[in-house]
Amino acid sequence: MDADVKKLLRCSRIGVCLLALLLAVACAAAAILVPRALDTLDRIGVTLEGIDSLVETADAALVAANEAADSANKLVADNSEAVAEAMEKFNSVDFETLNKAINDLADIVEPLAKVSNFFNRG
């Protein structure tokens, strides 16, 4: 029986040594991985803060773009009536009568110009 107890004691010691080795490896791995994981989490936090800042900037830009579009729409709406009124007035001009009046004026001014030139020479 002594031999069985010695075998059992020897196996127990080997098991304890293996468990101690496994625990040492686990602690070493944790000592290496935990700081890296924390560093990675910190970087993720910084990145998310940057993304939040970009989103806020994009939101502000969208608000400004919407305000600009609203202003442009208002400008178009306000001026479309004035443009329509101006076009209506322009279309109401009788160009044939205007051309005839210009020709009549030219017919009157031409002889006066000749008389004026005659007196300026002499």
Image (cartoon, grey):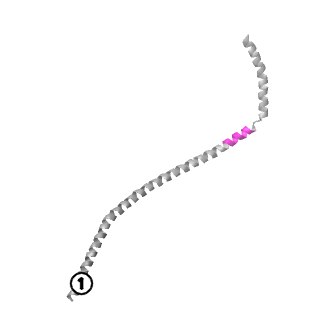
Q: Residue at x 77, y 21 (%)?
A: 110
Extreme-top residue of the structure: 122
The amino acid marked with disc number 1 is: Lys
Q: Tell me: residue 5, above or below residue 98.
A: below
The quadrant in which residue 36 appears is bottom left
Asked whether residue 88 is drawn in magenta, I would say: yes
Q: Quadrant of the N terminus?
A: bottom left
Asked whether residue 6 is drawn in magenta, I would say: no
Extreme-left residue of the structure: 2
The local secondary structure at tag 1 comes to helix
Q: Residue 74 in the image: state x and y as whole percent.
A: 61, 47
Q: Tell me: residue 45, above or below residue 90.
A: below
Left or right of 66, for residue 86: right
Q: Residue 54 in the image: state x and y as whole percent.
A: 46, 53
Identify the residue under disc 1: 7
Q: Residue at x 75, y 19 (%)?
A: 113
Extreme-bottom residue of the structure: 1
Q: Residue 93 in the image: state x and y as whole percent.
A: 75, 36
The quadrant in which residue 29 appears is bottom left
**Which of 65/81 is in front?**
65
**Which of 88/38 is in front?**
38
Q: Which residues are magenta?
A: 82-91
Q: Residues within 10 Å of mark 1 (few under 14, many from 20)?
A: few
Majority SS type along the magenta span = helix
Q: Residue at x 78, y 27 (%)?
A: 103
Q: Residue 94 in the image: state x and y as whole percent.
A: 77, 35
Q: Quadrant of the C terminus?
A: top right
